[in-house]
Amino acid sequence: MRYERELEVAQMAAREAGKISRESYATIEAGDVSEKRTNDLVTSVDIHSQVAIVNRIRNSFKKDFIVAEENLEGDINKGIDKDCSRRWYVDPLDGTTNYIHAFPMFAVSIAMEEAGEVVMGVTYDPMRDELFHAVRGSGAYVNDKRISVSRISDMRRVLLGTGFPFRARVFLDDYLKTFRFFFNSVRGVRRAGSATLDFAYLAAGRLDGFWELTLSPWDIAAGVVLVEEAGGRVTDFFGGRTFLETGHVVATNNRNFHDWMCEEIQKVFPEGGDYALHDD
């Protein structure tokens, strides 16, 4: 299997980071939390977990570029070409707000991209000890058991996942228009607070579709290969592949409602609009 060593390193790193978050679960105090920007929190656990992951990757792949959520002291890519064809995406703790409140929906997410394509992804849920992984062309798995997306195509039976634009509340009113439409059209909508787990659950057939805007690339990358290797489809709002750049994503089980979702979202967020996340 291609990328076997990369997968092994990612799985070990994810389990190590998950162990750190699990051991500190429900012990976070106010002094352990800081705000990177409005509504975007970071804890000491995020930092320690990311250090563990970066060290694992760097020890094995010294020339690969690493894109990670948390800013660490020093340059983790010192001496490495930023245009390197091999790039890792690291989210040490996706669902930090959940974690701070001891709400057990959070995960570690690690992905690798080569020549512009995400080729390997790992998502680890330390509270349920579920390790999701996929390598391009080799299928998707949870705890080494093959998984696939659901076969539901009747929109009235669909269960969707989503996330609120908590860092870009300027889009909240428009986002709620899409939420209201889908809420009234499908069986149910869930907002768990961890996009990486939403992707993993979609790959495993637990959700049938997912949409969100203004995500970061480390929120999306592992989920792309998981969902696609499980038989699903991932696009931006307009059916393209710009989701890592824009942060706007629609993912489904690849049944007949993917285009329908995109079409409904486009009514609120038409192509050509400025939907980027701008710092204050």
Image (spheres, rainbow, N blue to C red):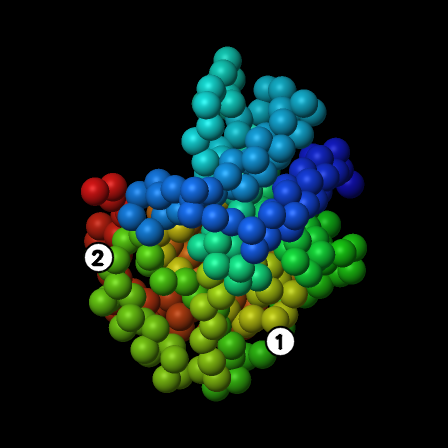
27 or 278: nearer the viewer: 27
268 or 127: nearer the viewer: 127
User: Label 2 is placed on what type of residue?
Assistant: Val
User: Label 1 is placed on what type of residue?
Assistant: Arg
What residue is at 75 percent from the left and 60 percent from the top? Answer: 146
Measured in 3D between alpha carbons, the distance from the residue under mark 2 to the one under mark 1, in whole angstroms, is 36 Å
Viewed as shown, does residue 216 lie left or right of 47? left
Tell me the number on the disc at residue 170.
2
Residue 111 coordinates in the image, percent (x, y) = 58, 42
Callout 1 environment at 10 Å: few (<14), some (14 to 19), or many (20+)?
some
Above or below — where is 13 with respect to 171?
A: above
The answer to which image quadrant residue 139 occupies is bottom right
Residue 277 coordinates in the image, percent (x, y) = 28, 47
Looking at the rendered structure, the secondary structure element under dot 2 is: helix
Q: Is residue 200 visible to the viewer in this orientation of the structure?
A: yes
Tell me the number on the disc at residue 151.
1
245 or 175: nearer the viewer: 175
Residue 197 coordinates in the image, percent (x, y) = 56, 59
What residue is at 37 percent from the left and 66 percent from the top? Answer: 262
Q: How many marks?
A: 2
